[in-house]
């Protein structure tokens, strides 16, 4: 009897110890799973450094868990640390050679190294160890296959098997969505992401992925709704803010793009990678001061891109720092291949040179721009105005004629300046034609009649025919309501008519016009002399 009691006691003790070990094992597994989920979330939202730090701490807490080395290696791969990641996978295998995930990790590393053949050997090992019945292993290999779009069908095969084993695992449907998207089947991709979201309402990732599909197809309302849902579920979902920034950028909503991208940069652990894009958003929002600070740092790097220099130069121009803008433009022109320089680059550089009073160089830059893109009415006008200001009237005439041909509806100002260019170039016949068109466009303005009268006066220098007379009379008629506004023009018109009637020996009419001149300008010497002679 005593022997039986001792045996029962020993059995109870063994059972108690086994139960304790089971509880400890379950506790350890739960602890690892919580930390693995948290680390996976960090990698998901572009916070790979946090994931690596957490997993390194977890490895120290559970040194005998080979699977932890797999998750650590994946986080390192996503952070660009390939060699370190391979070491982690190998450490996991050294701890437990029967852990299939570490072989899946090694295969993932090989895929990133463009060695699919080597990767498949590790994948086969992982599948053999798990007997192709471990959903997590199937997901891991499928994700690795998605590195190479040519192997997307292999990924779909594995994920389909994973779905048969467990049709309630959201990760399977998310990866299937990624695979379908690689196959350019956006509809199936969205359906898979929606299934994932229905399986776990706390996941932001399916909505983010759906938003990416809509953004790719330029369904901006759908993309915005999906990204906003993602950040509603997870206010710290870094990548959703990044893509919202891109979305607003495409919609030309600059302020919103800047705000979303600032949120992204505050959350990611690699903000330096997004600084250039952020500078572009600031540029679009016309926050040139902030943009210049970022561009300045980026331009100091040896590997600075030509496009960075281009935007920096323009941003400096817009902020009024013309000399530094010129310095950066010159760096850009020296760095960029000639065939990649755009018409807008020469246009901006020309405007910059104008600001520095280098009109001749500015015109050369405008010509280069117009050779690349002739349909630039604003630039043609600026070129024409520059020629006119420099009194290069033949060149101004050519530019204004090009501008008038280019415009769907020529502007009155174009005819006004073109006519004056002809006038000062002493091409009075052509000036006459242009000013007639100006009068047709603006029959109630005095300026057309004034310049047409001047042109006619040059075609009739002795005023014998009186070609200018009807136009000066028309000017007087149009200016009668606002004599103070048109005082100088009226003085000119009255003086001409006074002289014309003097030549015709129409003394009374002549005196009346000279008196009108003195009424507007009592100190007019010509009028005084004329009246003295007439009296």
Image: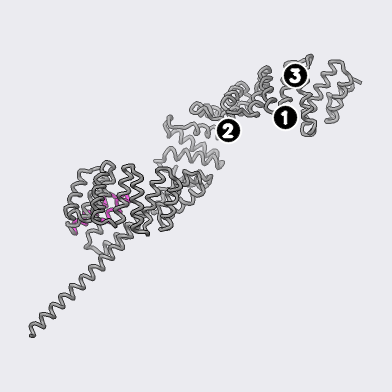
Q: Is residue 86 magenta?
A: yes
Q: Is residue 371 magenta?
A: no
> Which quadrant does the C terminus fall into?
top right
Q: Where, by quadrant of the figure, is residue 35 drawn? A: bottom left
Q: Which mark is residue 445?
A: 1
Residue 306 image offset from top left, x and y in percent: 43, 37
Q: Which residue is mark 3?
A: 457
Q: Residue 99, relative to residue 444: is it above or below? A: below
Residue 63 image offset from top left, x and y in percent: 23, 63
Numbered range of the magenta stretch:
70-95
Q: In this orientation, which residue lies closer to the viewer: 453 or 171?
A: 171
Residue 190 image offset from top left, x and y in percent: 36, 48
Q: Sequence order check: which comes first, mark 2 or mark 1?
A: 2
| Local SS, label 2 | helix
Q: Which residue is mark 2?
A: 354
Separation (CA) of disc 2 from disc 3: 36 Å
Q: In this view of the protein, can residue 157 be seen by the observer?
A: yes
Mark 3 vs mark 1: in front = 1
């Amino acid at each position: 009897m005593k022997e039986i009691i001792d045996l029962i006691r020993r059995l109870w003790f063994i059972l108690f110890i086994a139960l304790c070990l089971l509880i400890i094992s379950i506790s350890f597994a739960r602890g690892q799973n919580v930390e693995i989920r948290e680390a996976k979330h960090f990698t998901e939202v572009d916070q790979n450094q946090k994931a690596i730090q957490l997993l390194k701490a977890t490895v120290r807490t559970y040194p005998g868990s080979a699977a932890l080395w797999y998750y650590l290696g994946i986080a390192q791969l996503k952070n660009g640390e390939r060699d370190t990641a391979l070491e982690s996978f190998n450490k996991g295998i050294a701890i437990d050679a029967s852990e299939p995930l570490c072989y899946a990790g090694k295969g993932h590393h090989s895929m990133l190294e463009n060695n699919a053949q080597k990767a498949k050997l590790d994948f086969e090992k992982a599948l053999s160890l798990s007997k192709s019945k471990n959903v997590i292993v199937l997901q891991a290999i499928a994700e690795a296959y998605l590195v190479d779009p040519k192997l997307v069908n292999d990924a779909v095969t594995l994920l389909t098997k994973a779905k048969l084993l467990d049709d309630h695992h959201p990760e399977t449907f998310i990866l299937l969505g990624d695979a379908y998207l690689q196959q350019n089947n956006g509809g199936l991709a969205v359906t898979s992401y929606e299934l994932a979201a229905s399986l776990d309402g706390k996941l932001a990732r399916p909505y983010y992925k759906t938003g990416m599909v809509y953004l790719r197809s330029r369904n901006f309302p759908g993309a915005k709704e999906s990204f906003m849902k993602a950040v509603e579920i997870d206010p710290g979902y870094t990548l959703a803010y990044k893509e919202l920034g891109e979305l607003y950028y495409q919609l030309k909503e600059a302020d919103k793009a800047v705000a979303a991208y600032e949120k992204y940069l505050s959350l990611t652990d690699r903000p330096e990678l997004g600084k250039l894009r952020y500078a572009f958003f600031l540029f679009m929002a016309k926050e040139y001061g902030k943009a210049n600070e970022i561009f300045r740092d980026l331009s100091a790097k040896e590997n600075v891109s030509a496009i960075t220099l281009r935007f920096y130069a323009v941003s400096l121009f817009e902020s009024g720092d013309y000399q530094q803008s010129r310095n950066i433009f010159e760096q850009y022109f020296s760095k960029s291949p000639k065939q990649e320089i755009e018409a807008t680059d020469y246009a901006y550089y020309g405007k910059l040179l104008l600001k520095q009073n280098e009109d001749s160089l500015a015109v050369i830059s405008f010509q280069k721009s117009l050779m690349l893109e002739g349909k630039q009415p604003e630039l043609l006008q600026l070129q024409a105005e520059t020629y006119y200001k420099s009194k290069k009237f033949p060149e101004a005439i050519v530019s204004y004629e090009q501008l008038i041909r280019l415009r769907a509806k020529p502007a009155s100002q174009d005819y006004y300046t073109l006519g004056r260019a002809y006038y000062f170039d002493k091409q009075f016949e052509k000036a006459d034609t242009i000013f007639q068109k100006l009068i047709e466009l603006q029959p109630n303005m005095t300026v057309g009649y004034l310049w047409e009268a001047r042109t006619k006066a040059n075609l009739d220098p002795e005023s014998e025919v009186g070609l200018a007379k009807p136009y000066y009379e028309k000017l007087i008629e149009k200016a009668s309501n606002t004599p103070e506004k048109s005082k100088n023009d009226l003085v000119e018109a009255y003086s001409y008519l006074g002289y014309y009637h003097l030549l015709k020996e129409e003394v009374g009419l002549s005196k009346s016009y000279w008196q009108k001149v003195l009424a507007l300008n009592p100190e007019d010497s010509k009028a005084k002399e004329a009246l003295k002679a007439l009296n």
